[in-house]
Image (tube, rainbow, N blue to C red):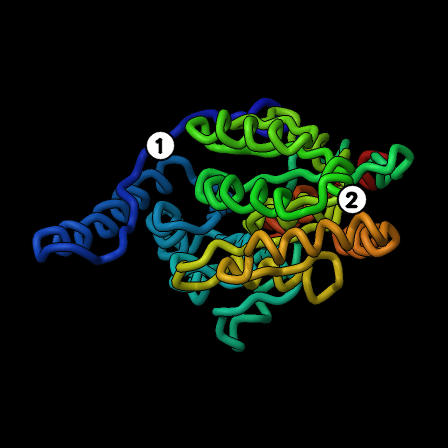
Amino acid sequence: LDYGTAFPAEAVHTLQPATPFSGSLAAKAAALAKPGLGTLAARSLIRRLAPMCVVGFGGYPSVPPVLAAALAHVPTLIHEQNAVMGRANRFLAPRVTAIATGFPKIGGIADRLRTKATHTGNPVRPAVIEAAGIPYPGFDDGRLRVLVTGGSQGARIMSDIVPAAVATMAPLVRQRLAVVQQARPEDVERVTSGYKGLGVAAEVAPFFKDLPARVAAAHLVVARAGASTVAELAVIGRPAILVPLPGSLDQDQAANAAWLGDRQAALVLAQRDFTPQALAAELVGGLADASRLRQAAAAARSVGIADAAERLADRVLAVAGLPDHAERSHEAAA
């Protein structure tokens, strides 16, 4: 699927989301009213649009339209991208027709509901699928190419830990590194000058438009463990050091990371264990034993699902009672 262009929205309708109940008594009362108002508005919208299927992708904004559709006996499907089902999807799971999952096994779902679940994988961008065709890079120049990306919530710790790890390495060893690193805008100058002072080739920026190509060019990726990141690493087939974002109620990133870690495709480090010394040891190990990285890359690629978007689309069509892509192709050929 060509996101945002080949599948444009015909219209955008805004509804009141369901929100968690926290804060003052007045805030809780307002939060209690919002999902009800949103669901009423969604029921009116569903009567007018008469959809064949309503699909939710988690988060509180998905609750009113999916709940309204279920109450109106419209076929419904939710997609859970993480390895632990989020709270909004847990609320909706008993009420929907079907569940699609980004991981083969997910936590936080009642056993009686697992018969509804189908593993489709997490859809990835076309650029990721294109990057998946790039072979694992060789080590012809003797350098270990490392990509560091942390997302908006993780770039600061990467900016603090990764340069410090490189600084602990012997000068002749660290000169064999080539680093591409995402950093917050306010950290770019600090991180860049740090690498320059260490004599390490580095490119540091707040954002890389061609991130999938950067992943493909890397021997090793250091990253958080969001569902999209894990899916893209698997599809492209690159080994990683994953540092799950701590503090979430569901520990979803820890579960996401464990899925790759259990398959020897990634090393998982809790944030408390993500120290300069621990990271430096792994980087030195990668320089000393390239075969280990190649094996991890192959393990990652073996579990990637490049056609997750098509699998999910086919599941939606099935729930709606329509023929899937294969059936339509067969009918067209006939």
Drawn side of residue 90 relative to residue 225, left or right: left
Q: Is residue 320 above or below residue 207?
A: below
Q: Distance between the residues labelled 2 and 1?
A: 32 Å
37 and 81: which one is in front?
Answer: 81
Provide residue 46's location: percent of width, then percent of height. 37, 42
Q: Is residue 267 above or below residue 226?
A: below
Q: Which mark is residue 69?
A: none
* Front tag of 2 and 1: 1
- Disc 1: which residue: 13
- Disc 2: which residue: 326
Which quarter of the image is occupied by the N terminus?
A: top right
Provide residue 109's location: percent of width, then percent of height. 49, 70
* Residue 317 appears in the rendering: no
Q: At 49% across and 43% down in the image, what residue appears? A: 160
Question: Amino acid type of disc 1?
Answer: His
311 and 23: which one is in front?
Answer: 23
Q: At 32% across and 34% down in the image, what residue appears? A: 14
Q: At 36% across and 54% down in the image, what residue appears? A: 67
265 and 187: which one is in front?
Answer: 187
Of labels 2 and 1, earlier in sequence is 1
**Residue 264 found in image quarter:** bottom right
